[in-house]
Image (cartoon, grey):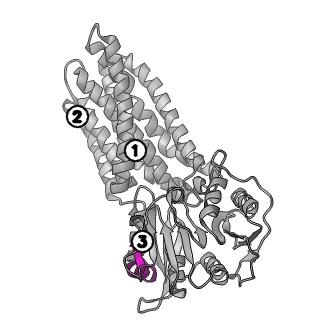
Amino acid sequence: MRFWTTIGLILVLSAVGLTYEIAAGRVLAPFFGTSLVTWTSVIATILAGFSLGSALGGLVAERERGAAVRAVRAALVATAVLMALSPTVLGLIYALGARDTWGMLLAVVVAFFPASVLVSYPSPYLAKLAVEARPGREGSSLGLVLAAGSLGAIVGAILAGFVALPLAGSVATFAGCGAAMLLCVPLIRGDTGGGAARNPKAILSVGAATIVVAATLASGPVCRYESGLSCIDVLRQGDAVYLYSDRTQQAAERGTPEGEAADPLVLPYTQWIWARMDRDLGPAPSVLFIGGGGYSLPGKLLEARRAAQAVAVEIDPLVTQVVERHLPWAGAMIVKAGYDAAGGTPGEAERRLGIVHEDGRVYLNQTDRRFDAVVMDAFSSGSVPAHLATRETYDRLRSIVDGPVYVNLIDAPDGPLVRGINAILADLYPHVAAVQGPVSRRGRTNILLAASARPFADVTLPQGYAAVTVAPGRAFTDDRGWVGHR
């Protein structure tokens, strides 16, 4: 094999490995959420696979050349199949009952570890070829091998985060990783120059693997709409339309048979937050919403308060697009009242719903606008993003929000997340109220907090909700924050 061909193969394998790693973290989210725990598990598992694969590949590199070539080709074909099937395996393990932290760890190991081992398996053999290809220049050859591995990792990270996952989705990304592995097979040659094209068994195995990769691609995405940030499904149940992101219910609205929305506040947590807002706020409030979701609460505010202003900060533009397409009432409100708040103030009086597609914490750090209230309703999969659950976040909120803070959480009753957020609010505000909804089979529920400088008047609770007292907890900080559900 030529020296630069070998270097190119090392770069490609490294790029595919990093693309696979990032795609694994993304496809895991609809099943087990996104948190420090899930990403730690994915990274540790795949790096362990890389390490084992390199060690085993080193033993193969010491074999007779023909045997080593056959082993490397077989590893590439097997890697293609395993990478392409990873989303299917993950879904199967989840369907069999894998849940919580230990179930997630099992799913990660079974779905992603084998391919991680095999993708790094050819690298020692290729590195040996590169060093042997230029006698007397072993040092520079080894340096280029290491550089190609690092550069490939950079390319893979950029490809996954900025191209493949946002534009093609996770299933197509896994299929693409498998296809890249198959394209490498003919380039693995022995001393005689004979490639895989002269080996009927190799042709058969590559053909079979190609069918598997193609079938995976044809199977479709893991959800109806997918970006690099969200995996969204829209379901209609009776006269209601529900929006799910990473399998967590985000929004819903109920329409009449003619398609006109009769009740935009289907979810009980939105009913309580709106009851609080309706009771606490004046006739012309300016309210900040961190997390657009289904835009139900901003829309309700603008419908009920003709002089109100709202700014909704939603990190994923795809969420807004899906709402406009599938939630008639909220979509109509966006079309009628929405404007790009990142570009400044609206040019027309009826444009009262500012929309900013940006991370909530970034917006808070940069805005110079003041508000009368804020609703914290941002989620990454089934949990609040850690950087939006810190004392520093709520310190900043207090400096730009003159009135109450409303917070929606999903946690176990009196769980660590709600205790941490409650501790932050209790440090900053003299009055904090908490209500809790029905507990799901997984032991989690919506827990809603409201904090203010003034006492709260009572409001009607949704069915199944009750006021609760939250136990003392440790206030999260940027340095030591929320790590996610376990």
Query: Start and end of the magenta stretch?
Result: 327-339
Q: Tell which circle, 2 or 1, labels the residue nearer the N-terminal end.
A: 1
Between the residue at mark 3 and the residue at mark 2, the CA separation in whole angstroms equals 67 Å
Neighbour class for label 3 at 10 Å: few (<14), some, many (≥20)? few
Residue depicted at 48% across the width and 72% down the height:
243
Estimate the x, y position of residue 347 in percent, counting from the top left: 37, 76
Tag 1 secondary structure: helix
Q: Is residue 328 magenta?
A: yes
Estimate the x, y position of residue 407 in percent, counting from the top left: 64, 67
Determine if residue 79 is in view. no
Q: Tell which circle, 3 or 2, labels the residue nearer the N-terminal end.
A: 2
| Circle 3 or circle 1, nearest the eye | 3
Q: Are marks 2 and 1 in contact (CB under 8 Å)?
A: no
Callout 1 amino acid: Met
What residue would you read off at disc 3? 345
Q: Which mark is residue 83?
A: 1
In this view, 64 is above or below 112: above
In this view, 13 is above or below 125: below
| Circle 3 or circle 2, nearest the eye | 3
- Seen from the viewer's position, the closer of residues 451 and 218 is 451
